Structure formats: structure tokens, C-alpha cells
Amino acid sequence: MVSQFYAVTVDSLYLLKSKKDSKGSPVFIDILSEKRFDKGEFIGIAREGITLYHCQNGVRRIDPYAVKREDVEKRTLPVIALFFEKEKAYECFYLFKNSGCRKKSQWSEETENVLREIGTEHEVFVISYLNPVFP
């Protein structure tokens, strides 16, 4: 089962870990600003962004794209790619920022590998089916 991965978004780079801290929140860190977000139970993965959120009305695995704004601790900007390797995530981020390249296809294999490893029943990471990372 996947325990961590890196997410490259339009404006930053994130480390996401399923291991929960003393507050019961999974690890969700903006690596570039060194800011940690720690008020949520699940990390949702959708095309429009990565979301740290709470369950709603007792529904544990609600699609992250459908979560009410008041239940969201953090929502990033749109996702460019997902990686298991930190070096590849940095490379993607800086290439994206420096070239303005909007093509996700060059990183699709890595992203698909991460999504496949997360699967549909992960205890912390929830993949959106309403707004998938790849159409």
C-alpha cells in the first residue's frame, strides 16, 4: 500500500504521507514554502487539485471533488503530475515553471503508476472519480 508520494501542481510541490501525526492528520507539506497542513482526515486527489479534508455527515470516503468548502483544510491548484521519487518531482516542477509547458503527457506514466498503486480502497488517499487527474 502506498505510504507517500509527491504532487507537482501549477504553483508548488507537495509531499503527501498516509502516516498520521499526533493530531490524527496525514502528512501534507508544501515543500517549497515548508508549510504543513494538519487539519484533515483524508487527502483527495483530483485534476483541480489535492485536498486535505474531513469526512462529511459520517460519509468516510466522499469524492474529494464533492467535498463542501467548510470541510476542506487545504486545496492546491491543479495537478501537473504525481511521483514516487522526489528528484523526478523536482525536475518536473522546474521544467514546468521554466518552460511553461502545459503538456502532462510526458509525466503520465509516473502519475498513472502512483494512482494505480493508491487504488480505490486506500485508508487515507482518495482518488476523485468525478474529476479524475487524467480524463
Image (cartoon, helix red, strand yellow):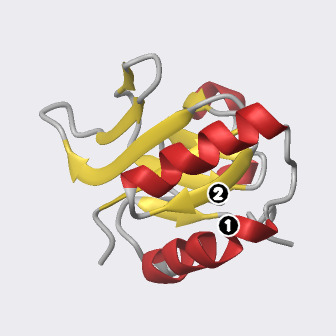
Residue at image location 55% in from the left, 48% down from the top: 91
Q: Which residue is mark 1?
A: 107
Quadrant assignment for the C terminus: bottom right
Task: Examine the rendered structure and indicate whether residue 90 appears above or below residue 60.
Answer: above
Q: Nearer the viewer, residue 62 or 4?
A: 4
Is residue 118 toward the left or the right of residue 65 in the image? left
Q: Secondary structure at mark 1?
A: helix
Q: Is residue 26 left or right of residue 54?
A: left
Picture coordinates of residue 81 (x, y %)? Answer: 64, 57
Label 1 – label 2 distance at C-alpha: 6 Å
73 and 105: which is toward the camera: 105
Q: Is residue 61 visible?
A: no
Q: Position of residue 112 (x, y in %)?
A: 62, 77
- Residue 119 rendering spot, x and y as whole percentages: 49, 81
The answer to whether the residue labelled 1 contacts the one labelled 2, judged by CB atoms less than 8 Å apart, is yes
Does residue 125 lie above or below 98 as drawn? below
Disc 2: which residue: 81
Q: Quadrant of residue 10?
A: top right
The location of residue 73, given as percent across then percent down, is 52, 27
Residue type beneath disc 2: Ala
Instruction: Give the residue displayed 59% in from the left and 30% down from the top.
Output: 12
**Around disc 2, counting alpha carbons within 10 Å, would you say few (fewer than 14), some (14 to 19), or many (20 or more)?**
many
Is residue 32 placed above or below 111 in the rendered structure?
above
Question: At label 1, which amino acid type do we have?
Answer: Trp
Q: Nearer the viewer, mark 1 or mark 2?
A: 1
Q: Which mark is residue 38?
A: none
Q: Is residue 60 visible?
A: yes
